[in-house]
Image (tube, grey):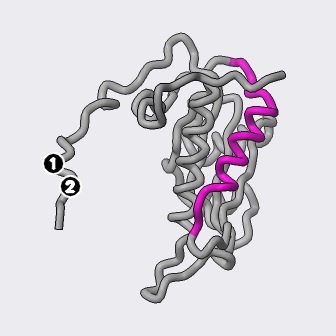
Amino acid sequence: MAVETRRYRDFLELMEERYSVRSYSDRPVEDEKLQRILRAGQVAPTGCNRRPQRFYVLRSEEGLKKAANVTRYTFHAPLMILICSDTDRAATMPDGQNLGTVDATIAITHMMLEAWEMGVGSCWVRGFDRNDVYKEFDLPKHIQPEGFLTLGYPSERSHPSHLHTEMPPIEEMTTYI
C-alpha cells in the first residue's frame, strides 16, 4: 500500500497546520507509516552524531496498558512510542550538559512532523514520573525516558486547542544582536 500524504505549499504550512491530537479514531496506523515515522526519528540530527535516541513501540494491549499505568495522557491512542535517550551514548558538552534529552526532543519533533505529513496525528507527552517509567518498562538506568508520542488518526471530534494559534509576536521572541 502506498503511503498517503498531505500536500503542502511548503514546510512552514505543514508546521502551522499540525496540532496536538487528543482524540483518536480506532483506525490502526499502517506499518509502512510507522516505519517512516521511526525513520524520521532515526535521521534527526544529534550532538556529535552519537544517535542516543531509543524508541519503544507500544501497540500491543500490554504495551499500551503499561503506558496508561504511568501517564493519564494516552488519549486512547492506538499506538504510542516511548522515546528515551541512552545517556552512555549521548554527547556531553564541556559544561557537563548531556545532550541525550536534546537529541530525543529533536527526534520527537521530526517524528511528529512526518506523521502529520502522512495524515497521522500525534501528541508529545511528558506528563509522567520517570521513576514510574523505569519500573513499568524495566529500563536500565542509562536509558532515560524523555517522552511518549501518541500516534493515530484523529477522530471526528479532534480539533486544535484554542491556544494553538496564540503566541507572542515574533518581535517579543526575537532579539537581534
The boundaries of the magenta stretch are 26-46
Query: Please, what secondary structure does the residue beneath circle 1 have?
Result: helix
| Residue 18 position in % (x across, y down) | 47, 30
Q: CA distance from mark 1 to mark 2?
A: 5 Å
Q: Nearer the viewer, residue 20 or 139?
A: 20
Q: Which mark is residue 171?
A: 1
Mark 2 crowdedness (10 Å alpha carbons): few <14, some 14-19, many ≥20: few
Residue 78 highlighted magenta (yes or no): no
Tell whether 9 sits left or right of 45: left
- Tag 1–tag 2 contact (CB < 8 Å): yes
Q: Residue furthest bottom?
A: 94
Q: How many marks?
A: 2
Mark 1 crowdedness (10 Å alpha carbons): few <14, some 14-19, many ≥20: few
Residue 31 highlighted magenta (yes or no): yes
Tell whether 32 sits left or right of 43: right
Q: Is residue 117 above or below residue 48?
A: above
| Residue occupying image coordinates x 75% and y 24% | 28
| Residue 133 position in % (x across, y down) | 64, 57
| Residue occupying image coordinates x 18% and y 41% | 169
Query: Please, what secondary structure does the residue beneath circle 2 have?
Result: loop
The quadrant of the picture occupied by the C terminus is bottom left
Q: Residue furthest front?
A: 9
Q: Is residue 141 above or below residue 162?
A: below
| Residue 21 position in % (x across, y down) | 51, 28
Mark 2: amino acid: Thr
Residue 113 appearing in the image = yes
Q: Is residue 118 above or below residue 11?
A: above
